[in-house]
Amino acid sequence: GLYLDGTRLLWPASAAVTCGYGGVFGMQAALVKDLFGIRDFSIKLAWVALAALVGSLVFGTLLAGSLYDREARKLGSEPYCLQPSCFETSFLVCAVCSLPAVLLTVWLARRTSWLYEPGTAREEARTGQGQPVYATFAA
């Protein structure tokens, strides 16, 4: 992975993360509607957007920024640090924290796969006759 190979995989890994987040961002409104229904839709979508903002603040600014500054100070190259050690810890923490997100995504995809099959509850949900998916999680 990126942690072992150094900067050789930095651009492909960055492109993969960017495409992944961009794809999810474009589908957020539809996912929120399908999973939680249209009642109070704007509030639910706002919470999803707020989660992305909080994640960016915590992982980007607070974690990566402080680790980068501390390593640059330690190496005596402040404010610039181009050594792999300036990024290794923050990449490792983000990778470890991404693992539960991947597992939850796989679980949710399997749990809701019936919703996206033709001729099932999705048609009912689209016409307003069915219940939102969260009603089936308790079953």
Image (cartoon, helix red, strand yellow):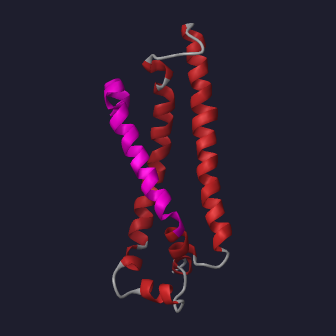
**Residue closer to the observer: 74 or 52:** 52
**Residue 110, x across and y down, in percent:** 38, 68
The quadrant the N terminus occupies is top left
**Residue 125, x across and y down, in percent:** 50, 85
Q: Is residue 6 magenta?
A: yes
Instruction: Say left or right for 73 vs 120.
Output: right
Q: Residue at x 57, y 7 (%)?
A: 76
**Residue closer to the observer: 40 or 105:** 40
Q: Residue at x 54, y 74 (%)?
A: 33
Q: Residue at x 40, y 49 (%)?
A: 19
Residue 37 falls in which quadrant of the image? bottom right
The magenta span reads 1-29
**Residue 100, x across and y down, in percent:** 47, 50
Up/down of 40 relative to 28, above or below: below
Instruction: Say left or right for 128 vs 21.
Output: right
Give the residue at the far bottom of this rendering. Answer: 129
